[in-house]
Amino acid sequence: QVHLVESGGGLVQAGVSLRLSCEASVRTFSTHATGWFRQPPRNALEFVPAIGGAGGSEYYRQTVRGRFTLSRDRSKNPVNLQMNNLKPEETALYYCAAKHYSDYGLKNDQYDYWGQGTQVNVAT
């Protein structure tokens, strides 16, 4: 069982940056593919970016490419999501999710473990 805890959310103005972190309860976290999803108010859960385990590749939602960056240090636990130039429409509850395996997925039902989420509010 893998327990995930997100942190770093908050209230910011549009154009500002935030960094979210996802920490796991297992030392083998770096071998698990990890993704971030978000659920805006009154909207469905949507994929943001994901990174493969064990040095795997990354994939980003098109609307965040060039602004959001995932980072994972193999020797450390957290997977960080640096979000730059945030937009009001990116206000959402952001979730970290992990898979049993190292290949990332783009759909929420491909993930086995989920955190409780961290709220990001972007004001105009």
Image: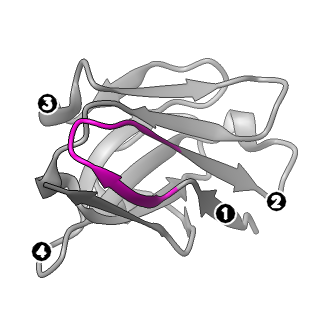
Q: Are marks 4 and 2 in contact (CB under 8 Å)?
A: no
Q: Are marks 2 and 1 in contact (CB under 8 Å)?
A: yes
Res 57 label:
none
Q: CA distance from mark 3 to mark 2?
A: 30 Å
Q: CA distance from mark 2 to mark 1?
A: 7 Å
**For the residue labelled by badge 4, is the local secondary structure a helix, a strand or a loop?**
loop
- Dot 3 or dot 2, earlier in sequence: 2
- Dot 2 or dot 1, earlier in sequence: 1
For residue 106, say whether it is visible: no
Q: Position of residue 82 (x, y in %)?
A: 46, 32
**For the residue labelled by badge 1, is the local secondary structure a helix, a strand or a loop?**
strand
Residue 16 highlighted magenta (yes or no): yes
Q: Which residue is mark 4?
A: 43
Res 4 label:
1
- Dot 1 or dot 4, earlier in sequence: 1
User: On the picture, is 107 further left or further right than 55?
Assistant: left
Residue placed most toward the observer, 73 or 57:
73
- Dot 1 or dot 3, earlier in sequence: 1
Q: Which residue is mark 3?
A: 62
Q: CA distance from mark 4 to mark 3?
A: 18 Å
- Dot 4 or dot 2, earlier in sequence: 2
Res 25 label:
2
Kindly identify the residue that appears in the image at 78 percent across and 40 percent down: 77
